Image (cartoon, coloured by chain):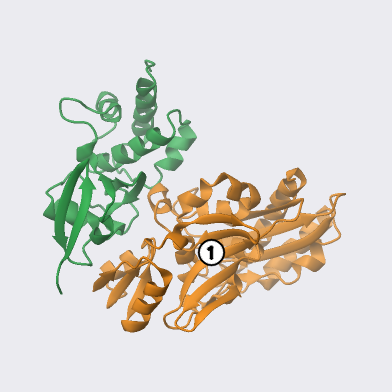
Amino acid sequence: MAKSHVSTTVNGDPVEFLCDAPETMLDVLRNTLGLTGTKEGCGTGDCGACSIIVDGRVVCGCLMLAVEATGKQVTTIEGIGAPDRLHPVQQAFLEDAALQCGFCTPGFIVAAKALLDRNPDPSETEIRYWLAGNLCRCTGYDKIVRAVQHAAAEMKGQPA
Amino acid sequence: MQYQSPASIDEAVAALASIGGACVLAGGTDLLVQLRSGTASRAAVIDVKNIAALRAIAETADGFRIGAAVCGADITEHAALVAAWPGVAEAAGLIGSTQIQGRASLGGNVCNASPAADTTPALIAARAVAEIVGPNGKRSIPVEQIATGPGKTSLASGEIVVSFLLPTRPARSADAYLRLIPRTEMDIAVAGAGVNLTLGEDGTIADARVAIGAVAPTALVLDAAPGILVGTKLDEATLATLAEAAGAAARPIDDKRGTIDYRRKVVGVLAKRAALIAYGRAKGAR
């Protein structure tokens, strides 16, 4: 079976790759494009560790075929901030100690950024529901929710 | 496995008909899990998300037409659709996480034919009609005629559900859907109930349709509901009779999510509460 040739945009850059039809976007990001910030937790859409943003919607990379990326705008954790210029959500996760082992963190940050892009002033309840598909086995979620609230305040130019 | 992404319904139908073992890929939130776990294997997947008609929500003279590949988030963000059909929208919005909402489709939820599918009872209560295209042309059937058992549908080989039509709304009409899960998010219904009401000018129920889910091999129309509800203003006795009728109509199984007795009890409570919500909404509706 011939591989498919896919042209897409990842983190603002045009990207082309070859893939087999059953390969997921998560497989291609990690194994073909070397973008290993996106994690595989469950592989069944339950844990959110592979959260990416595709055409403005946060989705699970494990539940999307890589060939479906044709013509799409894909954002991964590597496209959110930079080591010398952290996104406010990333900065807040650091300052508020919203991570321990860190495996779920890229997914949480991607999902939280998508929330704040859509709703700059979410309530705690809205944050908790929005992030219900991101599982964390370390923090108990509280610090994560506080960090998202903190980031929201920062992004509105108000000290938390 | 082959992947095809046709741009038209006719091309999709032709691809499905010409490749043995091909299946439709919409949101993929169930299909990809099945493919990866090896519980399903497909010669080809036909991605229908690049067909414009399957991704559109349109308000027409016949009512709202929702493309079968429209995802939950597109439904819950469509203000006019949510205003007209709050029950259908809340059912679609209950499915999975934010990440699942960005992909999982209305057509997939119905055509996977899970007895616990949340949108199916809501669509049945709404008298939604599924518009189907196949090798022999088009046909339309009520949503309750799609699922024939767990994982089984009445769709013929090569047929695709392309859209759902929700009828035009009379004045003072509204719907509601409720399900029970043991937590607030990320679970599958133990029982569910959709209620769709139209009121007369004095608040008396003029038309009623109730469907229940997760309590039988398919979602069920509660045939007794119009006889119980029409002509009333949802007094206590009427609600008690409705709950009893829903429990009696249920044919649930015992499993890890709930026992037979529990499901019969809960589906009655859900029908009662959904009726109250729909009634309140219909009173406030234009």
Residue B126 lies in quadrant? bottom right
Q: Residue at x 82, y 62 (%)?
A: B230
Above-or-below relation of B226 to B148: above
Position in image of residue B157 (x %, y %): 43, 83
Q: How many circles with numbers are drawn on the protein?
A: 1
Residue lying farthest top?
A159
Above-or-below relation of A84 to B48: above
Q: Residues within 10 Å of mark 1 (few under 14, many from 20)?
A: some
Above-or-below relation of B170 to B10: above
Q: B90 left or right of A73? A: right
Position in image of residue A152 (x %, y %): 38, 26
Secondary element at tag 1: loop
Q: A127 left or right of A22? A: right
Position in image of residue B101 (x %, y %): 43, 52
Residue that mark 1 sits on: B258
Q: Residue at x 77, y 50 (%)?
A: B172
- Which chain appears orange? B
Is any atom of residue B143 visible in this view? yes
Q: Residue at x 44, y 33 (%)?
A: A119
Q: Looking at this view, is A31 or B151 the one in front?
A: A31
Rendered colour, chain A: green
Q: A5 left or right of B122? A: left
Position in image of residue B17 (x %, y %): 37, 82
Name the chain under label 1.
Answer: B
The image quadrant where one finds the N terminus of chain B is bottom left
Is any atom of residue B266 visible in this view? no
Q: Residue at x 25, y 40 (%)?
A: A106
Q: A45 left or right of A9? A: right
Which kind of residue does numbered mark 1 sit on? Gly
The image quadrant where one finds the C terminus of chain B is top right
Q: Looking at this view, is A42 or B10 the one in front?
A: B10
